[in-house]
Image (tube, rainbow, N blue to C red):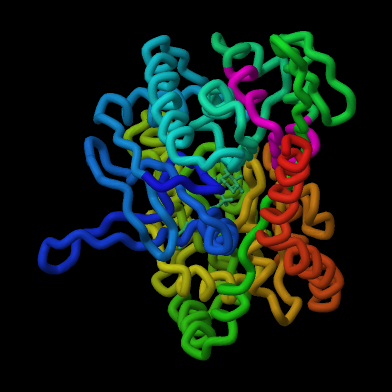
Amino acid sequence: MDTAEFVVVANRLPVDRVVGEHGEEIWRTSPGGLVAALEPVMQNVDGAWVGWAGQADLELEPFVEDGIRLIPIVLSEEEVAEYYEGFANDTIWPLYHDVIAPPQYHREWWDAYVTVNRRFAEAAAAVVAEHGTVWVHDYQLQLVPEMVRALRPDVTIGYFHHIPFPAHGLYAQLPWRDQVLRGLLGADVIGFQRAQDAVNFLTAVRRRLQHEVKGSIVTVPGESRSRPVLAKAFPISIDTSPYLELIEKPEVRARAAEIRESLGNPKRILLGVDRLDYTKGIRHRIKAYGELLAEGRLHVEDVTLIQVASPSRERVDAYVHLRDEIELAVSRINGDTDTMGHSAIRYLHQGFPREEMVALYLAADVMLVTALRDGMNLVAKEYIATRADNRGVLVLSEFTGAADELRRAVRVNPHDIEGLKDAIMAAVEMTPGEQGRRMRPLRKRVLEHDVNAWSSSFIKALAEVHARHA
Ligand code: GDG
């Protein structure tokens, strides 16, 4: 097999398998931000991407799609249930998001996590060129850096953590806490979304493993010599170009006007866009909005909340319950307040093409991002990117990574329902002048610090390590 200088390792391949009209297999590049971020990097170097194709028991040979060499990893039904839905999404995800939902600890899930991480690590170690670079992504693969290093001590290894890293008091619950820290410390550079995530990680390393930590550098003792590991924040961002292009398209603008029309021309459209996930604070948002209607501070003829809740992790119990709770709350509010011509909440449990998302962003006077905990939150940045006229208001939870950068948003603590209600009212009533004063610096930040700036800064940090190795 040909080797590759630069190998990305992520749970998912950057393509989705779709079956064509005549039953033929088609691969479509998935629209996610990671692909957009890494595509330019992958095209310029000799790159490969190791990942799962998203379907159990699907055995595939490596193939090339859109100029990127793809190396599929096979997962059995049982591994999908135990490694992915179990350990990744029902142990690590809730624990790392401040136990908003109770994490489930099962030894057989951990065993599957180790087995699957090893499979990814072996595939990466087999394809990476001598003195090449491996960039591992996210919480599904925290053991891969150490495993790759054991197999291939010559390569430079990066790891980027897309979700929060919890405070030590919570992290300490994890029965396999030391193994996970050692897994991550196999990397040369470990990137987090926020400075606080890096601090939490470094505290755990110092307290659990007693390694020396100075600033952002951990000294990992080795048999012959010790090794420095850099752990710091590299806040991720969006590829702004498709958003800037779509907002110029007459058909997207016409669609935004049509959305407003079809809602009965409310004075204000509020919007929420989230995967249906308990970390996103959808219930808190709906509760606050429902109370504002019930108290007469808002009127159903004047406002509509569009809530896009894209289906997610539908086989994990916590998500099944969450969906029931949200749908009950939405139908109660609509039942209590709707008129024939106006609906309080237009709830859409569906995924939409990007054109439609942009039309929704354009139509929205107020964007509600009320996550209880979120690594970054790209939706906030996408909304800002579409506001070329500097109008519109972003209501943003303090508990998102985005809140560190987007200081001029209307900031909220989503647990404080009264505070959230006041913030929604302030957003609904904000003058165009004040909207502009806030939106201008927000747009400057998002347009300047885009996903290319993010990937370049991470790759630069890796290149510096690489130069030291050489
Ligand atoms: C994780 C971390 C971190 C959503 N529904 C539709 C759709 N989306 C798109 C959004 C956005 C993306 O999905 C969601 O990104 P977020 O950042 O908001 O949240 P997570 O999915 O939880 O992502 C997060 C991120 O990783 C990156 O590091 O920011 O903190 O949890 O791009 O627009 N896109 C389309 N149709 C939908 O229905 N086309």
The image quarter in which residue 227 lies: top right
Residue located at (84% from left, 67% from top): 441
Q: Against 383, is 160 above or below?
A: above
Residue located at (30% from left, 60% from top): 27
* Residue 135: x %, y % from top left: 58, 41
Q: Against 70, is 147 above or below?
A: above
Q: Residue furthest bottom?
A: 250
* Residue 228: x %, y % from top left: 78, 26
The image quarter in which residue 153 lies: top right
* Residue 355: x %, y % from top left: 47, 74
Across the whole image, how many numbered discs are drawn on residues? 0
Q: Residue furthest left?
A: 22
Residue located at (14% from left, 68% from top): 21
53 sits left or right of 110 in the view? left
Position of the C terminus, as image quadrant, is top right
Whether 184 is among the magenta residues is yes
Res. 331 in view: no
Position of the N terminus, as image quadrant, is top left
* Residue 418: x %, y % from top left: 73, 44
Q: Nearer the viewer, residue 225 or 314?
A: 225
Whether 87 is among the magenta residues is no
> Which residues, given as a range, are shown in magenta?
180-198
